[in-house]
Amino acid sequence: MTKFRFLTAGESHGMGLTVILEGIPSNLSLSEEYIRIDMSRRQKGYGSGGRMKIEKDSANIKSGVRHGKTLGSPISLWIENKDWENWTTAMAIEPVNEKDDIKRQTKIVPGHADFPGTLKYNHKDVRNVLERASARETAARVAVGSICKKFLSEIGIDIKSRVISIGWEKTSVANVDQINWEHVENSIVRSTNTREEQLFTNVIDQAKKERTTIGGVFQVIGFGIPLGLGDYIQWDNKLDGKIAQSMMSINAVKGVEIGNGFNNTEKYGNLVQDVIEPNSQDERKFSHKTNHAGGLEGGMSNGNNIIVNVAVKPIATMTKPLPSVDIISGDIVEAAYNRSDICQVARACPIGEAMLAITLSEVVLEKFGGDSIQEIKRNYKAYISSFKEYGK
């Protein structure tokens, strides 16, 4: 079985993004249209910037798929940047004339990768950092995540997401079973209902009026998760740790919560532990009365829905720039302004789905390893049937 891994390459205003995904088994049905639908979800959201009016993201499959089925070999994807035609000189591969406009930038944006990245790599042009540090790279991750979601669906795993807060306004719907997912998918802010949509858009409008940005929290939920993914034996095999790392890798994410992690700290222990009871109707032969732990105990999935809440800070680039410095001259200046969103929380939802799908695909392949979809499904069914030995 090939090790599961992926790499992305490319700059925000370069020719495009390249992806190599390795470890997806053979015989998985896959099409460019399936990936395109998922990628289009990343481009929607109230408060999005002008870039989304330019790009119409799709991924061209260059290898690893034949006649609609994966081969088991590396899958390579190409995502074209439509805006490249306006940056052919500024982002040229070959040396350019010194008099050409290369859109050089030396003003730092507080809160961005600009400052540490420029000094770390000894650059004299901040653009060398911001082009790769841009959230444009997440288009490639969503493409990978789409393939992983297709793979996970073969064993009944489904992943969904919603926004649970924008700024100071929060959802009132805590019960996952009460979420109207059709409304979420059609909402411009991925809200749970019409009332929340109005509250969230009002906050974004206020931020835009004040020429600043606003963040929030989105929620990613994994349904149909089998018990036993991840492990308790070594720190780096704990699934909650893997999920936290993958979510923290998303641009502007500053906090990750599993289940009711933070709220649980305000209650007594007897109110937050998920009590277990016999249940002959459950494939595990047991079930939990609640899911405060968010589907993870001791670094392993316990068979409940995996619930992850992800905090996204306001975007660093604002139409009313903060005071900053010029990295070369040292002068005090206004921070640079690059086209960006007012609020990116809704657009971050599909990225969070992708990262959870990627993380779960890795541990599913470790647990039920095989070279073809058929082999993995046989291994999965045999594992689930072993639970019949318990709770007799």
Image (cartoon, rainbow, N blue to C red):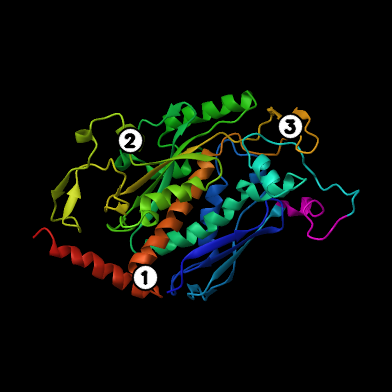
Q: Amino acid at mark 3?
A: Val
In-image side of 39 versus 24 (left or right): right
Q: Secondary structure at mark 2?
A: loop
Q: Which residue is mark 1?
A: 369
Give me the C-alpha separation between circle 3 and circle 2.
44 Å
Q: Of 282 and 197, which appears nearest the observer?
A: 282
**Residue 325 tag number:** 3
Q: Amino acid at mark 1?
A: Gly
In-image side of 24 versus 32 (left or right): left
Say which of marks 1 and 3 sits in front.
Answer: 3
Question: Eyeballing the image, is 68 above or below 153?
Answer: below
Mark 3 or mark 2: whose residue is earlier in sequence: 2
Q: Of 191 and 242, which appears nearest the observer?
A: 242
Task: Kindly indicate the quadrant of the structure image that contains residue 169.
Answer: top left
Q: Residue at x 49, y 76 (%)?
A: 71
- Residue 50: in sight, yes or no? no
Q: Residue at x 77, y 41 (%)?
A: 105
Mark 2 or mark 1: whose residue is earlier in sequence: 2
**Residue 174 tag number:** 2
Q: Amino acid at mark 2?
A: Ala
Q: Residue at x 73, y 35 (%)?
A: 336
Give me the C-alpha separation between circle 1 and circle 3.
52 Å
- In the rendered structure, does residue 107 fall within the stretch colored magenta? no
**Residue 377 tag number:** none
Q: Are marks 2 and 1 in contact (CB under 8 Å)?
A: no
Q: Position of residue 378 (x, y in %)?
A: 30, 73
Q: Secondary structure at mark 3?
A: strand
Say which of marks 3 and 2 sits in front.
Answer: 3
Give me the C-alpha separation between circle 2 and circle 1.
35 Å
